[in-house]
Image: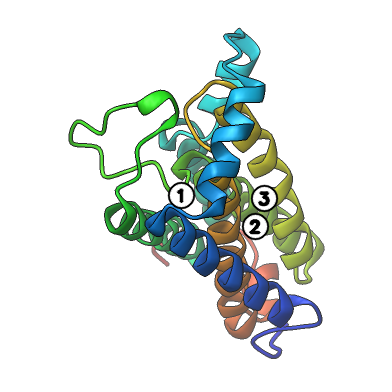
Amino acid sequence: MRGGWLRSWEPAGVAVSLAVLALLTWQVSTGGGVVRLDEHVYGRVGVVGSPLVTLLSDLGSPEVSGVVLGVFALHHSFFSGRWWPIVLATGNGAMAAVVVLVLKAVTGRRGPGELPLEGYPGYFPSGHTATAAVCFGTATYIVGTSRRLHDGSDAGVGAGLAVGIVVGAATVLSGNHWASDVAAGLAVAVLVLVLGFAVARRHLTREDLSEPRRRLMT
């Protein structure tokens, strides 16, 4: 399964994600047009106090997404006797958390409706969006790669974006994030997923995937 670091669309995906993230960070930091657009969207959409919206938004919490990813990683590591699912899950989760926290600290953005920070580092980018996309995308990669014995990068990124968009939309509807927070969270997720999967793809072999069941400590 060894191959190049990046394939087909991935260099373009990384470049676009970096550009989007840089543009949005600059606009949010300087109070540019994106900020006014966010306010317009918030004024038109308002806050939807629906239990379904709240449930979907909560999917992005570490307590939900992180547990889902942890279960998949531990399950596949135990039954394959290999550490790579745990390493990949931990690496992707940590990378997403670091990038999100750094950008929150740099921008210090307030939430919709003048939500106070009160010790919170900021609302940009949306941590729920990035967390959901990275966790569910990585879980999909682990399942697809382990069972089919081939690279599951496309499925992982696709699933991550799908879940991230749903969770991100829910955070906007619930009044917890601006639209640009969600867009930035998705950009962070794409970067983490593409780069994380590229590292895994570079180092995994068919033996890593098809090893018979055995204890992890053997």
Question: Which is in the foreground here, disc 2 or disc 1?
Answer: 1
Quadrant housing the N terminus: bottom right
Determine the image quadrant of residue 184: bottom right
Amino acid type of disc 2? Ile
Q: Residues within 10 Å of mark 1 (few under 14, many from 20)?
A: many
Specify whether 78 is left or right of 14: left
Amino acid type of disc 3? Gly
Is disc 3 placed on a helix, strand or loop? Answer: helix
Amino acid type of disc 1? Pro
Mark drawn on residue 160: 3
**Residue matched to label 1:** 125
Residue in view at x 27 percent, y 54 percent: 105
Sequence-first tag of 3 and 1 = 1
- The span from disc 3 to disc 1 (Cα, nearest Å) is 16 Å
Q: Residues within 10 Å of mark 3 (few under 14, many from 20)?
A: many
- The span from disc 2 to disc 3 (Cα, nearest Å) is 12 Å
**Residue matched to label 2:** 142
Mark drawn on residue 86: none
Sequence-first tag of 2 and 1 = 1
Q: Please name whichever residue, 214 or 146, is drawn nearer the observer in this view of the structure.
A: 146
Can residue 179 be seen here?
Answer: no
Residue 204 pos. (x, y %)? 62, 79
**Which residue in the rendered view is the most extreme toward the bottom?**
4
